[in-house]
Amino acid sequence: MDWTNRRERFRALISGDRCVHPGSVFDPISARIAEDIGFEVGMFAGSVGSMTVLGAPDIILLTLTEFAQQAYRINRAGNLSLLVDADHGYGNALNVTRTVEELESAGVAALTIEDTDLPQPYGTVGSTRLIPIAEGAGKMRAALGGRQDPDLVIAGRTSAVSVTSLDDALARARAYEAAGVDAMFFSGVTTRAQVQALSEALTIPIFLGGSSGEVADLDFLSDHGVRIALQGHHPFMAAVQATHDTLRALRDGVDPADLRGVASSDKMKRVTRHQKYQSNMKDFLGN
């Protein structure tokens, strides 16, 4: 697998002058669909990983090994440049280094490391806490220290905009940029004024964890240094609903031939790369 080519394409994209929406993916088939449709980037979130692998909510029950294995499955299925949410790096700064090593080996093009205090500390249920800026900067340096391929993009991530304040978010972003990260990912940004303030404070590309409401304009985001803007993880939620509805219909006695929303045989052949495997069978198993 040519992981470096995917990373070069991702770097070229965030070094450009336009903002794109990544396709939220969760397994090999969804990644192939995103690639076939024309998404430049795939996004594999820690929350979606937890639901896909464990059927559990996003409360840091998923392990690094499980997340990296699923990322590898996604990467080997096609040629999509994959951005992944590596949460808090699965521990302290030393764990962050290991996280980068594992995800780089799994073929990701870019990853984010956040400064949320995770997993949920005792006595803090119902609230979100951030680690001190100095500790966050140490995690960013550790992430960079674990990188072998210089084309792998490492982004700092903070939810300070919605958890503490915009000023705190700016202080964290400046510290992480000084530590050497390639980009900054912000969650909780909801206004154009916040985007403008972040853009004025940084020289590195910006990723946003949401792009609805007044920050939904890609032209505005592009003009303010935003290069990646997530749209949520609706493909997985839609897959859950479709599976539920199909199983419910079958349980209720609907004839399989009358089911709605089922992929055609041709589409299933496309997403499973049927023709390629048929060709291989002819070449390798034929008389």
Image (cartoon, rainbow, N blue to C red):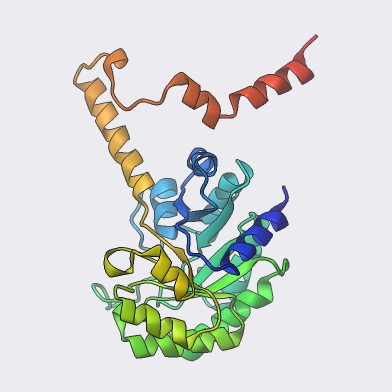
Residue in the picture at 68% in, 61% down: 8
Judged from this view, the residue extending furthest toward the left is: 252
- Frontmost residue, 38 versus 2: 38
Locate residue 10, reporting x and y percent. Answer: 61, 61
On screen, 155 above or below 135? above
Locate residue 69, reporting x and y percent. Answer: 57, 50
Locate residue 154, reporting x and y percent. Answer: 59, 71
Residue in the picture at 49% in, 39% down: 33
In the image, taking residue 175 as reference, residue 78 lies left or right, namely right
Q: Quadrant of residue 242?
A: top left
Judged from this view, the residue extending furthest toward the top is: 287
In the image, taking residue 177 as reference, residue 56 lies left or right, namely left
Locate residue 135, reporting x and y percent. Answer: 50, 86
Q: Quadrant of residue 98?
A: bottom right
- Frontmost residue, 10 versus 249: 10
On screen, 106 above or below 162? above
Judged from this view, the residue extending furthest toward the right is: 287
On screen, 44 above or below 168? above
Total labels: the figure holds 0
Residue in the picture at 32% in, 33% down: 243
Q: Is residue 286 visible?
A: yes
Quarter of the image where the C terminus is located:
top right
